Amino acid sequence: MALYKKTVNGKVYWYLREMARVDGKPKMVSERYLGSAKDIEKLLDAKEAVSVPEKTRHLGFGDSAAAWGVLQRLDVAGIIDEVVGPQRKGAGTPAGTYLALAALNRVVAPTSKAGFADWWKTTAADRFTKIPASVLDHRRFWDAMHKVSLEQLAVIEERIAVAMVTEFNLDISALALDMTNFATYIDSANEKAPIAQRGKAKQKRADLRLVGLGLVITRDGGIPLLAHAYPGNKPDVTQFPLMIDALGTRHRRLAESAGITATPEVTVVFDAGQNSASNFTRVTDTDLAFVGSVPPSHVADLLTIPATDRRIVDQARFGGLSATETRRVVYGAERRVILTHSPTLHDKQLAGFAQTLAKAQAKLAELADTLARGKTRRTTDELATHIKTITADPWLRRVLQVAITGDTPATHRLTATINEAARQELEEEMFGKRILVTTHDHWPVTDIVEAYRSQSDAEFGFRQLKDPHVVSFSPMNHWTEHNIRIHTFTCVLALQIAHLMRREADKAGEHHSVRELLERLASIQETVMVYPSTGGRPKARRILTEDIDTHARLAEIFNLKKWAPKKS
């Protein structure tokens, strides 16, 4: 091919010629007219306009695709639809799909149902789920929530638990139990949500109504296996037997569904917040083994055991943690009891007590100054009551020596000193120590300590639900008992999905927190390039961002190729 110039009436025109040898001689076999230089320039401009996108959009992909993949593996939507029955005509999409989508949103970017469709448009999920934003009006979600009765919800939760255990091969022999509550913004006059009550708020919001939530979480991956929502004014200790009964039943059914002929021993771990004689009895009556803790006052004599009687448990795993064991009567039965001492906990309690002591000293000093100026009218008894409030902490009362002189408000004087001997005695006796109690008479102390520390998995799950950015309980824009319980289900389902994702990544050598994992996946985005129309609708092409290569291992773990746009 070669360009060929012709001059006609002083004007230059260009042709594209193809030459070849014919019978051994060069001969032109084709000629194509290109036009003048201006004509060629117009052609090039037109070609460039078509090859450059008119506009682009960046959509979320990696995090939503990975979470959707786990929901698909568990067949969450299918389980829900099988339990609740066929969808109502005109429902848009089945109820199971709406609840699965609600959980997906909780994992990735928690928002209200009213804001769901707008969020959906910022993701590529409509492409790989085949669900358009037009059917995601908040009223459709409410219809789906109302379609599930609370009796059906219990069946759904159990079937999803079975699916998790079988699909992901979860070890359910070691479980941690813990409880917390969540503040809501439900109006005080609302009588349609008795589950939301004022109580002892763990988020320090005494002005808000609370919803309580108990979780039983696997030591294998920290996966919630059982959830129990309850009124926020109920003490944790009253909900413990309900959860233990449900756990015993749930575990037997899980074992049957997983094809386990002999029900394996299950060890449940709980802290002192659930302790009572009846609760200890309930655990043993349910054929569950346990590792728990009791307040030091129950076995106060153990606290006086000298440090020389303790032995390092496992330096490589637990650092300087030391322990000694014996047997004591705890809550009406003789049990194996282990006293542990952690240098790390010791230092934290020492620092915390120093702050508490400093605050109390500052308040007492301020009170002493007020008395010295004669600016108080408190009687001696009233003054003593006020001081008792300041020194309410029992450790403070052991260390602080407070003396009042004078018989009248004008003559009252106050002195406060620290008893250093008592302070040293308190530190040696109490700081860094924990009393563990267990039914496992033959487990090594190492295994008992490791089991008890799995309690942190449950605590981590609650912290995750209180993270406002990912896998969050809030916002909860529901005002009825039924919808609050369905909302709680979707939040726990989101926690299950997120922790299964973290477990899968961890097994593959990618060790990240839930938030870090989701952030890395979120960096894998989808770019939509829209080209100018050359007749008909504008043409769009989709590609993934370069972070698909940066996080290629995560893309492989979650099979993102399955959900990625197909290359044209």
Image: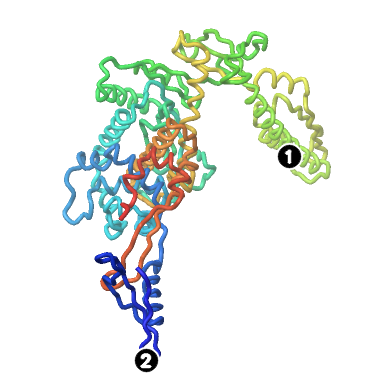
The quarter of the picture where the C terminus appears is bottom left
The residue lying at 38 percent from left, 20 percent from top is 173
Does residue 192 sit above or below 139 in this rendering? above
Residue 181, compared with residue 423, is above or below; it is below
When asked about the image quadrant of residue 530, the answer is bottom left
Residue indicated by mark 1: 363
Q: Give the number of the disc on residue 9.
A: 2
Residue 49: quadrant of the picture: bottom left
Furthest-front residue in this view: 24
Disc 2 is placed on an element classified as loop
Percent x, y of residue 17: 32, 72
Badge 2, how many Cα within 10 Å: few under 14, some, many 20+? few
- Expressed as whole percent of the image width and height from the top left, the position of residue 374 reads 81, 44
Residue, x 41% and y 19% (percent of image)?
267
Percent across and percent down for residue 300 are: 60, 15
Name which of mark 2 and mark 1 comes first in the sequence. 2
Q: Residue at x 40, y 82 (%)?
A: 38
Place of residue 245 in the rendered image (x, y in percent of width and height, measured from the top left): 33, 24
